[in-house]
């Protein structure tokens, strides 16, 4: 998929997933990779940015096997940012879809 | 690439960061390796999927140093942020280093101009006073008394120029930070995806 498309929406996808439940980094990569391809290493700089912006917080939790995992959780500020992003995304994608729809209609 | 080699390369490119940032970032990536191995992937596979450790490390460094320069403004902090941004690619020599040098030169030239005016004022006033006192036998084309005040005016103007230059450099500092952030987001952010 076009890298430019992904760049704009990856923040939103991560925040949307974290809104459902807290996840650790590896899990986020897996959950997103199931839908579309991403470079796995790009998720950690993104999470770090969300952390410095105050949109997520972290805590460590032991796992059954292996080392403790760093879980990310959406803060109140993050929830507000997510809602705004999703709202804007919906408006934008509706507009783009209807524009593309018009072109397809003309061709058809 | 094996896990240890990957983490070592990442570690090397993070050398300019604080111990805390360093620990956190390396922690994230070693956790990623550990969980990947648990899930039955091998080290090479995980390393390849993560992407070039040096590119990732340089980007962390630039983002972190820009944030530091923003939170606690200093010429040194700005210099480090710019140096880190230059590390992201040759292209930045043109779009970051050149404009930065030009702006620094302009700020220094205005500062020099301000200092010259500040120094010129007392000289004018001083020599006019000497003429009035008769110590310095010279005839001025204007009244010596006017020259005394003219000198004071010049000094005040110089001080205003220096003050203005100070505000200009503060404004350019803030703009510079925004530009560096934009540079990373637009030019380099996409490389990591």
Image: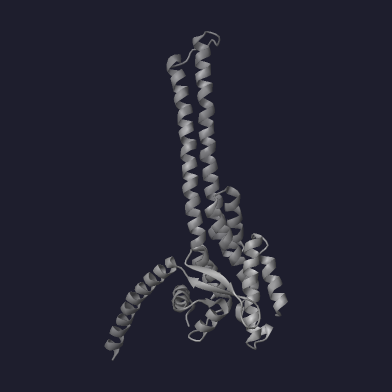
* Residue drawn 65% across the image and 87% down it: B41
Of B42 and B39, nearer the camera is B39
Quarter-of-image position of residue B149: top left
* Residue drawn 42% across the image and 17% down it: B146
Left or right for B168, reference A94: right
* Color theme of the render: one colour
In the displayed structure, B172 sits above or below B142; it is: below
* Residue drawn 45% across the image and 34% down it: B160
In the displayed structure, B54 sits above or below B151; it is: below
In the displayed structure, B36 sits above or below B143; it is: below
Q: Visible in this render: residue B89?
A: no
Of A57 and B106, nearer the camera is A57
Q: Position of residue B143 (x, y in %)?
A: 43, 14
Quarter-of-image position of residue A96: bottom left
Q: Quadrant of the N terminus of chain B?
A: bottom right
Q: Position of residue A57 (x, y in %)?
A: 51, 68
Q: Visible in this render: residue A94?
A: yes
* Residue drawn 50% across the image and 86% down it: A34
Q: Position of residue A98 (x, y in %)?
A: 29, 81
Q: How many marks?
A: 0
Of B70 and B83, nearer the camera is B70
């Amino acid at each position: 998929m076009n890298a430019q498309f992904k760049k704009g929406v990856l923040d939103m996808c991560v925040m949307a997933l974290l809104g459902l439940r807290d996840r650790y980094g590896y899990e986020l990569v897996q959950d997103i990779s199931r839908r579309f391809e991403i470079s796995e290493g790009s998720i950690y700089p993104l999470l770090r940015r969300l952390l410095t912006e105050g949109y997520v917080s972290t805590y460590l939790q032991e796992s059954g096997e292996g080392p403790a995992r760093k879980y990310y959780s959406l803060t109140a500020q993050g929830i507000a940012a997510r809602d705004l992003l999703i709202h804007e995304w919906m408006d934008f994608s509706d507009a783009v879809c209807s524009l593309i729809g018009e072109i397809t209609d003309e061709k058809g | 690439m094996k896990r240890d080699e990957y983490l070592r390369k990442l570690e090397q490119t993070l050398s300019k960061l604080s111990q805390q940032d360093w620990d956190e970032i390396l922690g994230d990536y070693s956790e990623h390796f550990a969980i990947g191995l648990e899930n039955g992937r091998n080290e090479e596979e995980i390393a390849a999927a993560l992407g070039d450790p040096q590119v990732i490390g340089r980007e962390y460094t630039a983002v972190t140093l820009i944030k530091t320069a923003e939170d606690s403004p200093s010429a040194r902090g700005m210099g480090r942020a710019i140096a880190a941004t230059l590390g992201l690619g040759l292209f930045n020599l043109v779009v970051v280093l050149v404009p930065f040098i030009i702006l620094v030169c302009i700020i220094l030239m205005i500062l020099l101009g301000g200092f010259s005016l500040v120094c010129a004022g007392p000289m004018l006033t001083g020599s006019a006073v000497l003429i009035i006192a008769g110590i310095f036998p010279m005839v001025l084309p204007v009244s010596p008394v006017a020259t005394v005040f003219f000198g004071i005016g010049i000094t005040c103007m110089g001080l205003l120029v220096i003050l203005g230059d100070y505000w200009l450099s503060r404004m350019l500092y803030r703009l510079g930070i925004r530009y560096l952030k934009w540079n990373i987001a637009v030019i380099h952010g996409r490389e990591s995806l």
